[in-house]
Amino acid sequence: MLNGKKIVVVLPAYNAAKTLAMTYREIPFEVVDEVLLVDDASRDDTAAVARQLGIRTVVHEQNRGYGGNQKTCYQAALDTGADIVVMLHPDYQYTPHLVPALASMIAYGEFDAVLASRILGPGALKGGMPRYKYLANRLLTLIENILLGQKLSEYHTGYRAFSREVLERLPLELNSDDFVFDNQMLAQLVWAGFRLGELSCPTKYFAEASSINFRRSVVYGLGVLKTACQFRGNRLGLLRSAFLRSI
């Protein structure tokens, strides 16, 4: 708990049995009140490992996709009475040690949502991010900043924190169940006028860390561009996209 706010960490999991324990054991429980894991129909023992660790676990009987997993994560966290929800991937790609920093920026009223950026500082390439992904990240972020009118260092990190108000207000059910969910959610945050902050975060790329392949990366990139264009089209009054207009 920070400043009287209940902190819940959510772990959107898929085939994370090999890395889950490492991630969980580094979570700073001096500030984290509860941890929830949503297993998206993994083909390994993710759910069993989670239960052995004592993590409250929700299992999807069928794979619902990364966005669908997050939808379940956030609703489950709200149901526990969370004031601040931190999404942490259980693949050990991001350090759990930054949970207090992310949460405190919301708990003390500075921001409504916070992103842990791999691009601020030398973290991305030093941590092993493939060069083509780094370059694509920089190009997509440039385009998104122009179309959304922001100055973020990256839109594609999987390490994020949100206030309860954000999660209750945004119509997340209208977003994709795939990876582009992340960008649709950020577009909604900006559209709604929430305060969005960032902090620098190291990252690790290794065999067991989750990563989408080149084909899915291309599909994701096209979805990102579509989302940014929809945002600008709605801002100019040329479109009326439900995922934005319903806020």
Image (spheres, rainbow, N blue to C red):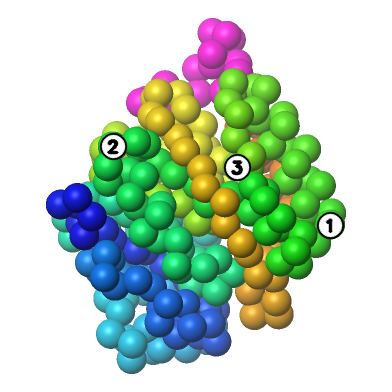
Look at label 1 and name its amino acid. Arg
Percent coordinates x, y for residue 200 in the rendering: 57, 51
Give the label on residue 60, or none.
none
Q: How far apart are marks 3 and 2 (CA)?
A: 22 Å
Earlier along the polypeptide chain: callout 2 or callout 1? 2
Q: In this view, does 9 lie to the left or right of 18?
A: left
Q: Residue 109 carries which label?
A: 2
For this view, does 33 lie left or right of residue 24?
left
Work out which quarter of the rendered image holds the C terminus and state it. top left
Q: What residue type is disc 3 on? A: Tyr
Label 2 neighbour load within 10 Å: few <14, some 14-19, many 20+:
few
Q: Are the two marked residues, 3 and 2, in contact with CB atoms closer than 8 angstroms?
A: no
Residue 238 point in image, percent of width and height: 58, 10
Taking the spot 58% from the left edge, 26% from the top edge, the residue there is: 150
> Is residue 234 inside the magenta stretch?
yes
The Cα–Cα distance between marks 2 and 1, rounded to whole angstroms, is 36 Å
User: Residue, x 63% and y 64% (percent of image)?
Assistant: 203
Element type where label 3 sits in the image: loop
Q: What element carries label 1?
A: helix
Q: Mark 1 points at which residue?
A: 131
User: Disc 1 to disc 3, how far (Cα)?
Assistant: 17 Å
> In the rendered structure, which segment of residues is drawn in magenta?
229-247
Depth order, front residue of 235/160: 160
Residue drawn at 63 percent across, 42 percent down: 154
Q: Position of residue 34 (x, y in %)?
A: 25, 68
